[in-house]
Amino acid sequence: MAVAIRLRREGSNKRPRYRVVVADSRAPRDGRFIEIIGHYNPVTNPPQVTIDREKARAWIAKGAQASNTVKKLIALAPKPGA
């Protein structure tokens, strides 16, 4: 099973919110997922990014592939204890 770390869209029209999820790469974008590891709200100014870096690192160590957008969001997410 190929596992991906990607965004799952939520929210209403023109008011998107996203969850950062670990999902089977064959599952639909907003379909089944294995675990929620964070949130992203691009509507706020500045955009809110909350990602559990430890869980993300653990999944990547297990072989999960992060999407390009998620890689950027992980870099933007505040570090724990900061």
Image (tube, rainbow, N blue to C red):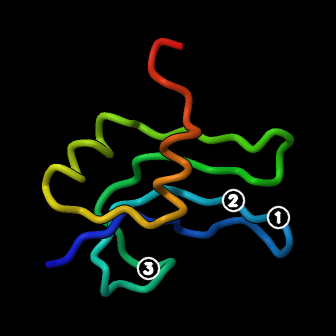
Residue type at tag 3: Gly
Instruction: Point out the tag, 3 or 1, that comes first from the N-terminus.
Output: 1
Query: Residue at coordinates 70% horizontally, 50% vertically from top-left?
Result: 41
As drawn, the label of residue 15 is 1
**Real-space Cα separation, disc 2 to disc 1, in angstroms:** 7 Å
Query: Residue at coordinates 31% horizontally, 87% vertically from top-left?
Result: 26
Q: Position of residue 15 (x, y in %)?
A: 82, 64
- Describe the element under mark 1 as helix, strand or loop: strand
Residue type at tag 1: Arg
Q: Position of residue 77 (x, y in %)?
A: 55, 36
Instruction: Answer left or right for 64 relative to 17.
Output: left
Viewport quadrant of the C terminus: top right
Up/down of 71 relative to 57, above or below = below
Residue type at tag 2: Arg
Instruction: Point out the tag, 2 or 3, that comes first from the N-terminus.
Output: 2
Viewport quadrant of the N terminus: bottom left
Q: Nearer the viewer, residue 65 or 13?
A: 65
**Real-space Cα separation, disc 3 to disc 1, in angstroms:** 19 Å
User: How many badges with numbers are in the image?
Assistant: 3
- Mark 3 and mark 1 in contact? Answer it, CB < 8 Å: no
Crowd tier of the residue under label 3, counting other residues whose Cα lies within 10 Å: few below 14, some 14–19, many 20 or above: few
- Describe the element under mark 2 as helix, strand or loop: strand
Q: Position of residue 48 (x, y in %)?
A: 69, 40
Instruction: Answer left or right for 32 relative to 49.
Output: left
Query: Residue at coordinates 27% horizontally, 42% vertically from top-left?
Result: 57
- Mark 2 and mark 3 in contact? Answer it, CB < 8 Å: no
Q: Position of residue 27 (x, y in %)?
A: 35, 84
- Mark 2 and mark 1 in contact? Answer it, CB < 8 Å: yes
Q: Which residue is mark 3?
A: 31
Q: Which residue is mark 2?
A: 17
Query: Residue at coordinates 33% horizontally, 56% vertically from top-left?
Result: 35
**Real-space Cα separation, disc 2 to disc 3, in angstroms:** 15 Å
